[in-house]
Image (cartoon, grey):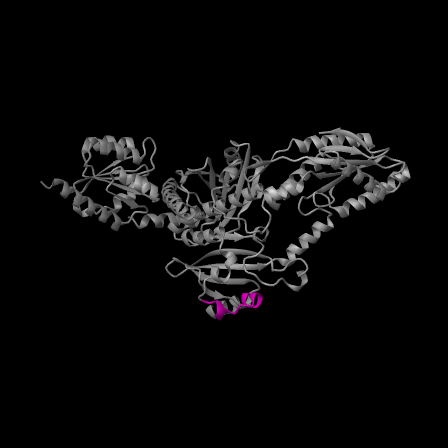
Amino acid sequence: MSLMMDQIFNMINMGIVIFDRDLRVHSWNRWLEVQSGIPERYIKGASLVKIFPRLNTPKFMRSCKSIFALGNSCFFAQKRHNYLFPCPAPLSVQANFEFMQQNCTMGPLRDEKQRIAYGYITVEDVSELVAYEQRLIEANMLDGLTGVRNRKYLEQQLQAEFARHKRYRRPLSLIMMDIDFFKKINDTHGHQGGDLVLRRVAAELASMVRDTDTYARYGGEEFCCLLPETGADSAAILAERFRRRVEGMEIEYQGAEIRVTMSFGLAGAGGEIADREALLRRADEALYEAKRTGRNRLVMAEPQLRLVKSG
Amino acid sequence: MTSFLYEEITAEETDILQEVMNIAFGKASADLAEVIDIYVVLNIPEISVMKATDIPCCLAREISRFDKISIVHQNYWGKFKGTAILVFPAKAGRELATLLDNGPDEGGELLDPAEMERDTLTEVGNILIGACVGKVAELLDDVITFSPPRILVDEESRQVVPAETFDARHSAILLKTLFTFEERDAGGFLFLLPNSTSFGWLKKALHTFMEQYL
Amino acid sequence: MIQKILVVDDSLVSRKIIKSCIPADRGYEIHEAVNGLEGVAKYKEIDPDVTLMDLTMPVMDGMQALEEIKAFDERAVVVVCTADVQMKTISRVMSRGALMVVKKPITRNAINDALYRAEQTITGHNRP
């Protein structure tokens, strides 16, 4: 049986590394040799955290401690860690990742006396799975960070809705909005704080629209909302509700409370706004005007730029 | 005439199991303090023996004292096999977030506070379940493998009992303990549901445990 | 010379285990109590030479019972038997005057050692 196990150890289509209580490598299987480019004879006896300094995190060390002390298993999911052992990404996904994406499991190995003598880590290549999931997200027309619709989806919808507006003379409005002083938020709270703000604001505002409306992330900190069957005046009411909602949000991040405001530009299809590029452009100009005249406010395009409500 | 196929756990075996659990949880507490550096109090476990079909509503009743809960759920296999369920009241995640020292974020996935809570609960849950179940297994001379922990955060407490087919012919054991983290205002319940197919082995193992003393 | 041993533990199984680890051939008289309150009462009543005390018990736990016994008789020899062997617990127990801590699961050797230590202490107490 041992002869068969030896063969399995090196033929199995996943990585297995066995290490002792000092985290020194006892065995490094063929899969890992091939994927990492590190032969077993080179790494045998070496400390895992010295060879891979990236592993030297509180969670990893704590996990090692717990498998030896408690005999439990620990899990390192790709979603949280990306990978434990740096290996080149498979060819098929090199456009997506530099390194192979891995799900890893760590656990104890006992000797004849049932004492935990070694630990193991198994490594599973999930790069293709993750790439597929990412493609799905794109295909779904969702923005990866905030989960709202992405620009691609909005543009599709805009095309369809504008065509419908033209054909049936139904009202159609577009609100362009963006977060005031976003750069300052990034500078103060780091890009993670900034991303949190984007996610929270997007989630909040997206929850306020109907199924037939499209709420999308248009750019970095810019969002827009396409409102079919809605005239400019009704859209303005919604935009004001947006403005007030954002103004009232308290976003907790690392002990600080972040408060934000947004500026809004709004345009309604019809009259001079005769095609979808014009709708976008006029809404954008109105947004620019809102910024220019003090932020935290809504400006409507058509007939002239008209300030509706200020903060 | 219905024939009963289930293995019954006797009162004497329940007493022995109680003592085994006491010892296991005491040792688990000590080990947890060493590994995660926090004083955890694991209370005397309560053992209830009941009809298997009563488990879902019994669990639901226990859980219902909280409105919103987070759950870490893990299966374990050895000769002693079953399900472990850790129930935290909703705010526990926030309290426990600072429990584990995680250093500066290594720039993997972006973590907002909600994700960090999930991570902490999952890791704490994994360690707690591993310690408790592992120690019980050790005392009964068994070796356990664990499934990765699954987590549900901030759920309404109603619909969270795991969907298992409970065979009315079997009796079931529910092991429940209250745990509290002394330095954080957080705690919850740990439920162990041994799989009825392992009762035969469990009974033997409990008697073997006592035999070393008699 | 140890003659009377008091075992205080709420678990019947645990008391059984402890009793089975106490050597049977030395003529010890073994008494039992099922919680800290009863333990303190029994202590006052029978004046045992050694007390084997569990910590987690209802009504009154071992920590408090230890304190009360020591308050009553500062030379009481109390050996704490517990599975909870965290540093904090051990130091709390020792600072309340326990002789030593024995880890659960109990073994015959551990009980023997504890009784030996207890014997030494008692002889020491009795030295003029």
Front position in the image: A121 or B84: A121
Q: Residue C97: in sight, yes or no?
A: yes
Q: Is residue A302 left or right of residue B11?
A: right
Find residue A73 and report its horizontal and vertical position in percent: 48, 53
Classify the position of the C terminus of chain A by image quarter.
Answer: top right
In this view, which residue lies farthest toward the left? C128
Front position in the image: C120 or A50: A50
Residue A250: name its quadrant: top right
Main secondary structure found in the magenta portion: helix
Measured along the vertical axis of the image, is residue A295 above or below residue B83? above
Front position in the image: A5 or A307: A307
Q: Residue B164: in sight, yes or no?
A: no
What is the number of callouts on the image?
Answer: 0
Is-magenta flag for residue A125? no
Is-magenta flag for residue A33? yes
Find residue B151 and report its horizontal and vertical position in percent: 55, 44
Residue C69: name its quadrant: top left
Front position in the image: C42 or A243: A243
Find residue C110 and report its horizontal and vertical position in percent: 26, 49
Residue sitting at x 74%, y 44%: A218
Q: Which residues are magenta?
A: A32-44
Residue A117: name its quadrant: bottom left
Find residue C108 and report its horizontal and vertical position in percent: 26, 49
Q: Is residue C46 left or right of residue B95?
A: left
Measured along the vertical axis of the image, is residue A9 above or below residue C71? below
